[in-house]
Amino acid sequence: MVSSSPFSSVPPRVLTIAGSDTSGGAGIQADLKTLSACGTYALTAITALTAQDPGGVQGMWQVSPEQLRIQIDAALAYQPVAIKVGMLATAALVDVVADTLASCPGVPLVLDTIVSASSGARLLDDDGIVALRERLLPRATLVTPNRQEARIIAGSDNEAALQRWAREHGVSVLLTGGDSSGLTSAGEARFCTDVLIMHDSIEHLTLPRVETPNSHGTGCTLTAAIAAFLAHGFPLPEAVQHGRQFVHRALQAAAPQAWPGCGPLNHFFAFGSNTAQENAP
């Protein structure tokens, strides 16, 4: 039977709500690349403009609550089947996202709990953290803090404590470990371990660490990839595994590239290095 949906012939649609990054390596730009590379169609709502260069974040200007509300309402008309939320900047913008997404309670939501940039620049104010905790976290399917963010958002980075917190809020947690020093055994390669904390299980997910300075936008890419695989219908644990593998391969492909400062991942690793030459006139 052929579906009568007017959208039946297009890829699964994913809405990303995040800030813009002039370097193209993180934020909305990284989400667009990731969602496209993972076979989904990206809808966007921009929360803030940032000016970023190899030295870090040089400036940030958030949109107004009304501007964000209109963007999200317009994107929701396209019926996204998964949502990713990144940088929100202020409590007022958190409230807008919580209010507008109340209209689609069954759509999976991956929440990247961005508090600070890797350079240290603050990207969510104190009132925003409170609003995130009280209004948006209970709506999320998965939140993805690193250990510092977990201590700020949930009060602890202890796995058992986080599981109790996750049960209380009705959400799963992916405690990311890419920012840690990793593990070394007898001089062997280091590893990166993320911890998937669900209501009834705690699973340690380990991959070899990719030694590269080109890791700008890793967290944005991970959450967008997980949202993409949820949109394709994978259960949460499988979507997380596929998302982590996507990031791992994007880091591997980026490792030999020369960038000033902390460069971006190579989101289009699957397209091959000779694509441009093969299609040149």
Image (cartoon, rainbow, N blue to C red):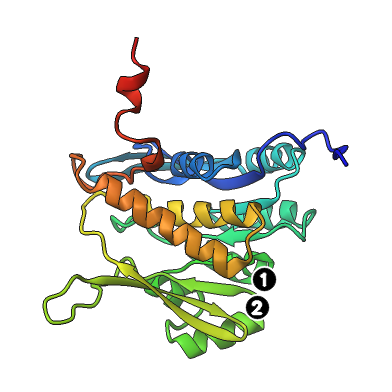
Question: Is residue 132 visible to the viewer in this orientation of the structure?
Answer: yes
Which residue in the rendered view is the most extreme toward the top?
Answer: 281
Pick the front one: 133 or 271:
271
Residue 204 placement, left or right of 4: left
- What x and y, as percent, mark residue 8? 77, 37
Question: Is residue 113 visible to the viewer in this orientation of the structure?
Answer: no
Residue where numbered disc 1 is placed = 138
Q: Secondary structure at mark 1?
A: helix
Residue 101 placement, left or right of 181: right
Residue where numbered disc 2 is placed = 169
- Up-down relation of residue 123 to residue 209 (above or below): above
Residue 198 picture quarter = bottom right
Q: Tags 2 and 1 in contact by the CB under 8 Å rule?
A: yes
- What x and y, as percent, mark residue 56? 27, 47
**Of the residues under marks 2 and 1, which one precedes in the sequence?**
1
- What x and y, as percent, mark residue 26? 40, 46
Residue at (58% x, 83% y) in the render: 165
Pick the front one: 256 or 145:
256
Q: Secondary structure at mark 2?
A: helix
Residue at (60% x, 67% y) in the render: 236
